[in-house]
Amino acid sequence: MRKAYISIDIEGLPGIASTTMLIPGNTQYSRGSKIMTIIGVETAKQLLSNGFEYVVLADSHGYMTNIDYLEIPRNVSLIQGFPRPISMLTGLDGSYDAALFIGYHAAASTPHGFLSHTMSGRVFAEVRINDRRASEYLLNALVAGEMGVPVILVAGDKHLEEEVREYTPWAVFVPFKRGITRYAAEYPSLEDVLDRLRRGVQVAVNRLKRGEPKPLFLEKPYRVEVVVREELIADLLETMEPYRRVDAYRLVFEANSAEKALRIIELSAFIGYGVYGLKERIK
């Protein structure tokens, strides 16, 4: 059975231009949820019409309950809920033929990237792997690569395109939007975006059939560097293995696998959230 895995985020989607669209209860959240559902479902349908028999769609933004389950078609399984193991890639394993990253945004510290961040914009000012700025795309592509799964398509903020071209040149990049500032973006009509997506999926599947995409690997061990936004977070993280503190806000560690690196970064983000909660209670 040919299987595909879709990890879909929201900040890199067209029509998303305000934080009011990102969190349940906010004034424009229903619009963001609708856009995410339409594009996620269309991606799955295109994969099914291009030879895949089974597709998993992983809702991968915020509380990870953004997609309307009532819109999911046959032969598509939906993963939702937060927190969960390896975050945006829960359930991915070597049985999948391909992974697609939809609605992805630029890495933390990318100039003009719309709501650019890596794992947690509140906790991390920057994340680097082997001395190179790292996005969620790169972290997740490395984890997928260790499972033997190639990334065949990435769609989102055009500011992410250069990184995709550098690390996975075999992957189709579909520009959904272009960040102008952190809180402003330009994007074409939804119909134009969907046309781009359909063409992109077809090209990506054809490349896969020719054997062009391959799992991503970088030199190991991975040297991971995080820059946190709050010094108290660094105070706590430096007490944890395998961190080593460099300065007030910067810490480094090494990992022999991308999944381990991702798990440490994710746990560090949870600790960071706890620090902010603690500060609110210290009066």
Image: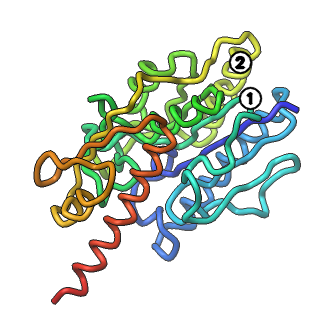
Amino acid type at image mark 1: Asp
Q: Which label was assigned to residue 208?
A: 2
* Mark 2 neighbour density, 10 Å: few (under 14) some (14–19) many (20 or more): some
Q: Give the residue drawn at x 41%, y 22%.
A: 219
* Mark 1 neighbour density, 10 Å: few (under 14) some (14–19) many (20 or more): some
Residue 61 drawn above or below residue 14: below
Q: Give the residue drawn at x 25%, y 43%.
A: 252
Amino acid type at image mark 2: Leu
Q: Label 2 vs label 1: CA separation?
A: 9 Å
Q: Which label was assigned to residue 15?
A: none
Of 156 and 216, nearer the camera is: 216
Of 64 and 144, nearer the camera is: 144
Nearest to viewer (mark 2 / mark 1) = 1
Looking at marks 2 and 1 on the same chain, the residue that comes earlier in the sequence is marked by 1
Quadrant of the frame with the N terminus: top right
Name the residue that disc number 1 marks.
97
- Labelled pair 2, 1 in contact (Cβ < 8 Å): yes
